[in-house]
Structure formats: C-alpha cells, structure tokens
Image (cartoon, helix red, strand yellow):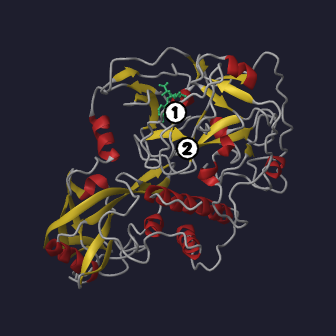
Amino acid sequence: DVPTDPRAKVKRCLRLFQVISRQLLQEVESGKKLPDMEINRIDLRTAKILGELNETLNRDKPVVGLVPGVEVGDEYRYRAELSVLGLHRPPQAGIDYTMWNGIHIATSIVASGGYSDDMENENVLIYTGAGGKPTGKTGHTEPEDQKLKRGNLALKNSIETKTPVRVIHGQSTSNSGKVVMTFTYDGLYRVEKYWREKETYMVKGEPKTVAVFKFRLKRLEGQPELNWSKLKKVQRSKVREGLCFKDISLGKEKLPICVINTIDNKNPRQFQYITKTVYPAWYQKTRPKGCTCKGPCSDPKTCSCAVKNGGQIPFNFNGAIVKAKRLIYECGPMCGCPPSCYNRVSQHGIKYPLEVFKTEKRGWGVRSLSSIPSGSFVCEYIGELLRDREAEQRTNDEYLFDIGHNYDDSALWEGLLSDDGIITDEVGAPSSEEGYTIDALERGNVGRFINHSCSPNLYAQDVLFDHDDKKMPHVMFFACENIPPLKELTYHYNYGIGAVRGSDGSVKVKECYCGASECKGRLY
Ligand code: SAM
C-alpha cells in the first residue's frame, strides 16, 4: 500500500532508492555496465528508475521551506537521494532555486565543506557562492570571478523575501581507504547578508585570486539540535555524562558497549552477557555441507551457498545486504572460502560502536555513536533457544523473540520493486511445524535492549551459516535505512494487536511509546 503519512512516504521513497541502488551496485560489481548511462553512476540510474516508476516526491512543484516528512538529522549517501525527495533537486549544483512571486529565490543549498568547516558557530553558516572554481584536481580551467546570477542571485533575493532555505551538509569520511560521503539535513536557515571577497586557488602550482560571494545564513530557532553536534559534545567531554558501565559485554564483544543513563540513577537489571545463542541440550547441530570455492566466493553459479541463495551472493562488496530475503545462507565453517569471503557478513559480529542508553518512556534502548548506512549488519538477537511451548511457560515475556515470525515485517519490504516486481523472494521459507523462540532475559547480548518502533530503522533477517536447520535460523538485525549517530535503533516486534493473551486467556495490552508519526499506539 502506498502510505499517506508524509514521513512514511519519504521512508518508502528512500528505501526504494537504497534497494534499487544496491541491486545496481551488485550488477556493476559483477562487471555489468548500466543501461543508458554514459558513466556507471548507480545513483543517477536509480533516480531515473524511480522517476520512471513515478516514485519520486515533490518533483513537479518545488517546495519552499519544510519538505513534508523530512526531519532534521536525516542522512543520505547520495546527492540523488536528496533529489528524488525534492529536498535538493539538482544532481550537482550547490544551490537549488525556483520562481516565487515573480523572482528567483533559493530553496536549498548543499554545503560540502564538512560540518565544522562551513559553520561559523552552531547556528551560523558561511556559504561560498557558486561558479568560478577551477575544475579538476589539478585545475584544468582558470578560476573566474563569480557572477551575481542564477543560484547566487537567488540566494541574494532570499535576503529580501526572507524565505527559508534548507541546508544540507555534505561530509566526506574515509572508511578503509574509501571516501564515503554523508549528507545530513540540518533544517531551515534564513539568508541574512552577502558580500564579495577575494579567494585564492592554486592552479598548476600558481596562486590565482578571484572574487567570490559569501552568504551568511542563520538557522531558524526552535529546530531540533543536529545529532552531529550532540556527538561532538560527547566526543569533547572528558567524562561521559551518565556513564553506568564502560562495557556491558565485559570484553566479549570486539567493541565495548557502554551503558548511559541521563534519566535516573538506575542500572540495567543483571543478566549474563553472551555472544553465542545457547541451544538446548537435546539439540544436535547438523553441519551444513559448505561450498568448495577456493578463495572468496565470486561465481554465484558454482558456489553452492550462492546457489542456495537463489544464485546470488546476497551482499555488496561493502557488506551491505542487497535486499531482504526470507532466509540467507552465509558461507560457514565447512566452506572452502576464507573468512574474508563476501558471503560472510553477519557472522563476524558487531562493527558499529553501539551503546545502551536509558530512554524516557521505553526503558533501556540501543543507539550507535556512528552513522549506520542502510543495508549494514548491526547485531544478532542472542539468548537461550526454546521451543515455543516452553517459551509460553516463561513468566517474563519481555525478552522473547519468536523466530520465524520476523519475516512478517511486510511493510518494510513487500511491494518494493525489483526487476521481477518484488524485492523479497521465497527462498527457503521456514516450515510452519514446531516454532522456536529466543529468550534473552537471563542470558543475552545487546540485541535484547533494542526497542520496538512502528516506523523502525532495523529489520530482522533470518540467516544460516553454522547449521542447516531452517526452523532455528540466526536472527540478524540489518539497517533498513541510513541511521544517523545517536538515533535509537528499533525494529518492529510484529505482535498482532489483541493477539497476545495472558495465562487466563485474557487479551493483554501494552502501550507503544515509539513516538513515530504512524505509531499504532500499542505494541499488542
Ligand atoms: N526497553 C527494554 C529494557 O529496558 O530492557 C529493552 C527491550 S525488551 C526486548 C522489550 C520491552 O521493552 C517491552 O516488553 C517493553 O516493556 C519495552 N518496549 C520496547 N519497545 C517499546 C515501545 N515502543 N513502547 C513501550 N515500551 C517498549
């Protein structure tokens, strides 16, 4: 169903973008060239596909001010994502503008100098006008004086019209030698003044001085603080406010998981931190056969694990899951490939700096100190494995995860399009015989602290690698959107409203405090 809520519409559009771009990336990684593209730009090709599917937003009528459904702090990997939302339409230009009451005004700018370089202080941005820069790394063209036309003129006009301008920061970070861009929506600003000044560029080793325009933009009051600036404060502070434990995993995870409570003076209830699910004594693991590949698996036709995945390695080379599937087979201990094989992702454990924190109304929750790109593996749900009927006997049901019911997360991925219409496929759908549940009350990992949201940013993916039993796959959480730092991580618990009953048969009610615009009000 096409959502009507503006936030849900934005999320749907971005999810489509991300799923399609990851599929295209997979094609490019396998050596294919993208159709009707002069250069292999998956972002531009994805935007084009979304346009053809009529799945872009706000493209017909440019928006002045707030774009419905876009929130301060939202993150993007590609400029084209800004474009498909109508947040900032041009694929390259830094200033977007439109005709408004007879004059051109600026609607949005992308400040790509990195958050700290562009900001005079937390609320004031100094933006350099467009044009005149030498192009190419070594300076193929001479720099020129900037002209007061197009975007520059529109920004100047916005001083008089007092119309707000959306600001998006572009930040490049290096990740294992690769430059990764992140664009963050910073909210609405007003252009206060502009002036001309001299700027010097090095061209072929020679300094060249030209005139540029500078615009001073002030952030409108009453908007939420950016998580990036909150994070800066955290990084600058010597002692972390509200620190309860430095590492709740007691060294068992590769990265420490600290516990922060700035709400009250309570600690989390005691439990044993484990990093591997505890199987019942009666359970005999059956080792999967494993592939016979030598070196990282690359040929989906010969790798038997890829064949089980429907003839595909389900991950991009950067470890992002291409699309949600009922069940994914990673390579495992019996395979011939090394640990660096692309078909081994979630088995390697946590790689984002997670922390447990006290929320206002949902008890403890989990967040990351760094951005998590859509498609990334976050963590597993680990605990004691029980038969459903044993789980039903447990008096505390707060940390139960019913395996096999997570794929009912239909709103997250059903109807999302691929070549064949749907991004999910039915490979290895679990049988409906006896069900299993993971209980993380007494023994568990960080996954036990992840709360429910009616508009989640993670989804639970069933994965097999060290045994072949489809009835008890590993429950692995992957990001289904780009997640900014310090944003709470959530998944959809998938309880039916009215479907949870107490031991006396009466319907149990639990209110939901996820705060999403499309919140149903109840967990069950
Ligand atoms: N918040 C838990 C804690 O403090 O340990 C961690 C999550 S635990 C798996 C599930 C429980 O968290 C639920 O039974 C409920 O009490 C609470 N919870 C999770 N999501 C919630 C939400 N959206 N609204 C209200 N309570 C929530």
Q: Is residue 354 visible?
A: no
Q: In what element is the residue under mark 2?
A: strand
**Residue closest to the eye, 29 or 205:** 29
Give the percent coordinates (x, y) of residue 99: 29, 82
The residue sitting at 14% across, 74% down in the picture is: 160
What amino acid does circle 1 point to?
Ile
Residue at 32%, 26% in the rendered image: 263
Taking the image as shown, residue 387 lies to the left or right of residue 377, namely right
Q: Nearer the viewer, residue 96 or 200?
A: 96
Q: Are marks 1 and 2 in contact (CB under 8 Å)?
A: yes
How many marks do you count on the picture? 2
**Considering the numbered disc 1 on the image, is that residue within a helix, a strand or a loop?**
loop
The residue under the point 45% across, 51% down is 174
Q: Earlier in the sequence, mark 1 or mark 2?
A: 1
From what the image shows, is residue 337 above or below residue 71? above
Identify the residue under disc 2.
458
Residues at marks 1 and 2, CA–CA distance in whole angstroms: 10 Å
Residue 431 in the image, given as x and y percentages of width and height: 82, 39
Amino acid of disc 2 = Leu
Location of residue 208 with respect to 378 vertically, above or below = below
Q: Is residue 119 left or right of residue 391?
A: left
Q: Residues within 10 Å of mark 2 (few under 14, many from 20)?
A: many
Asked if one can make out residue 208 in the rendered structure from this viewpoint, the answer is: yes
Mark 1 CB lies closer than 8 A to ligand 1: yes
Q: Which mark is residue 278?
A: none
Asked whether, in this view, residue 411 is left or right of residue 309, the answer is: left
> Can you tell which mark lies on residue 450?
1
Q: Quadrant of the N terminus?
A: bottom right
